[in-house]
Amino acid sequence: MRSGKRWVVCVSLGALMATGLAAPAHAQPKTRIGALKLSSSAPLFIGVDKGFFKEFGVDPELVFFQAAAPIATALATGQIDVGATGVTAALYNIVLGGEQMWIVADKGREWPGYPLTGIVVQKELYDSGVRSIADLKGKRIGITTLGSTFHYHLGNILEKSGLKLADVRVVPLQTMAAAIEALKGRQVDAILLPQPFPATAEAQGFGKILFWAGDLYPWQVATVFYSKKFAADRTRAVDFMKGYVKASRYYHDAVLGQRDGRPAPGANYDEVVAITAKYTEARPEAIRLGFPFQDRNGRLLVTDIQRQMQWWTENGFMKRPIPLKGIVDTSFVEEAAKAVPEK
Amino acid sequence: MAVERVAVTDRAAFLRRREYRALRVLALLGIVVLWELVTRTGWVSSLFLPSPLSVIGELADMARSGQLFVHLGVSLRRLLWGFTLGAAGGIAVGVSTGFFSRMEAVGQPLIAATFPIPKIALLPLLILWLGIGEPSKVAVIALGVFFPMAINTYAGVRQADPLLVRAAVAFGAGRWSVIRKVVLPSALPMIFAGLKLGAGTALLLLVAAEMIAADSGIGFLVLHAGNIMDTTKLMVGIVCLSVLGVLSHWALTGLERAAIPWRHTS
């Protein structure tokens, strides 16, 4: 009786496995994209939602992460094919450690006129006369982690104002939520956080946005990465990029237009807000606060990648910079930008 | 009359515990050599598993630059404060709940209710209460040490032989005299077991304690190296933690021998 039952279980399990295995064998492999649930991933959301990737024969699957660094790790171990997130010291160190991956396209810049990351100071400090970066000397500044994009941005902004990282006390608080709480609880004097946190701090009255970090120091904060294996599959890698370029143009025309320094939303603005809200699960009002700038065709600021590696090396986060040829490959985006027709 | 000797095999021989000192050292060395070989041949990427030699090299670099001692010093201070406060509190609570039934009625349910709370989950609250400076870091460690100490001390006190207590009372000992001369000494082995557990817990919690607003310390080193994917530095931090673990165990074992001489006559 018991062995009979077990036999039935075995057969049904076997059947289940057979169907489970047979299904993907007929379809083409999915392209797994690692991303964060942030507004800056909007071009990918558009590409997936409006079927731009499918149009070029790529079947995308979004895999969501909690932070930027694990995306780089997942890419190195081949658990995802494409990564789309901030460039951190972790990514460079993985490539330096011998795990090849490629930076292939723009996925968002800190850019003048496009509020993304804000430098928020305590309201009392602002009222007592803290108005410039130089006034931040000796203050406690909260960020997520050392080696994050915020750390890089803060360091470069300070250097531009004639200060050094050592002139302030950088306080790593691990999460964005903890950083905003620390400002509220007056355990730090200022924070560097992306929207919607600065707007929230101002709305609740405990913080004041001093500057938008992108106005002070523009840079290539986020990029699209390919795993070694995915980059080697040239046709699929270019096809994916075609979908990305199309989505990127759609995104650019819908939300990045400006006239006389003021945002001038395009025809599809509300649609892009709705798609972004759907994938990020954020409130549309928070999304309307601003979209990060990126090149219309997804082209990279290649020289900035070089500059980043130099800075990380100078500050002891990398042993040495990687030659650009060993980490950046713009051929995919160039080929795709030519192949995708303008409407 | 001649005595005939008969050889008897010791049928309990399999129970005899030998030391095998050489095997202990060889096993450890063997694993390290195997590890080095595996990474040398490129079978495992050095990013995923840094080789022992590169870890030793990084350790030497960090020692030369003085960075290592800064991290060690900061962490040792936090560990010592946390351990001392936690252990003292735990012993005090353990002795009083073990000896006085009113204290037991109050303390036992409280300990049972608060013991299973993960100390890391309390971190945000501790930061609100104590700020992001040293006190919140020390408090995380102290809380971790407190519970094994309190529970072990309580058990040790309860184990005191009632016959010895009665004998002491019969010889005219007062309440404090009984605690000091009978109950506490008989609880000592359990207290030391608790101290060893607590030392381990303190090291485990060091990484959690140094998660928030730390810019030095071994726990910070481990987290930070992980964040920037510097796996060699990560291993240096892990090696430091494990060496600290071994050293604290040795120190406590030595202290135990000195404090409870009647248990270690050999």
Image (cartoon, rainbow, N blue to C red):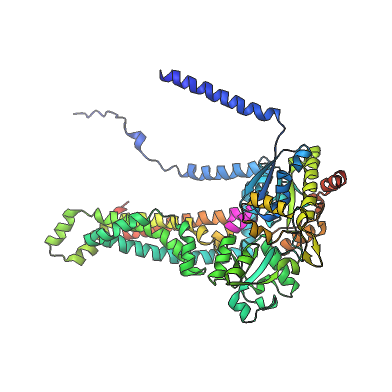
Q: What secondary structure predominates along the stretch shown in magenta?
A: helix
Question: Is residue A180 left or right of B140 when viewed as pictured?
Answer: right
Where A80 falls versus A121 (above or below)? above
Q: Identify which residue is drawn at 59% across, 63% down.
A: B68
Q: Percent position (x, y) of residue A321?
A: 76, 57
* Span highlighted in magenta in the image: B223-236
Question: Quarter holding the N terminus of chain B?
Answer: top left
Where B49 falls versus B146 (above or below)? above
> Which of A338/A21 is in front?
A338
Check residue B235 for magenta coloring.
yes
Q: Identify which residue is drawn at 75% across, 60% down.
A: A308
Q: Percent position (x, y) of residue A226?
A: 74, 45
Q: Percent position (x, y) of residue A144?
A: 61, 61
> Which of A72/B145 is in front?
A72
> Which of B29/B5 is in front?
B29
Where B109 falls versus A236 (above or below)? below
Question: Is residue A243 left or right of B156 when viewed as pictured?
Answer: right
Question: Is residue B109 left or right of A242 when viewed as pictured?
Answer: left
Check residue B240 for magenta coloring.
no
| Location of residue A181 (image quadrant) | bottom right
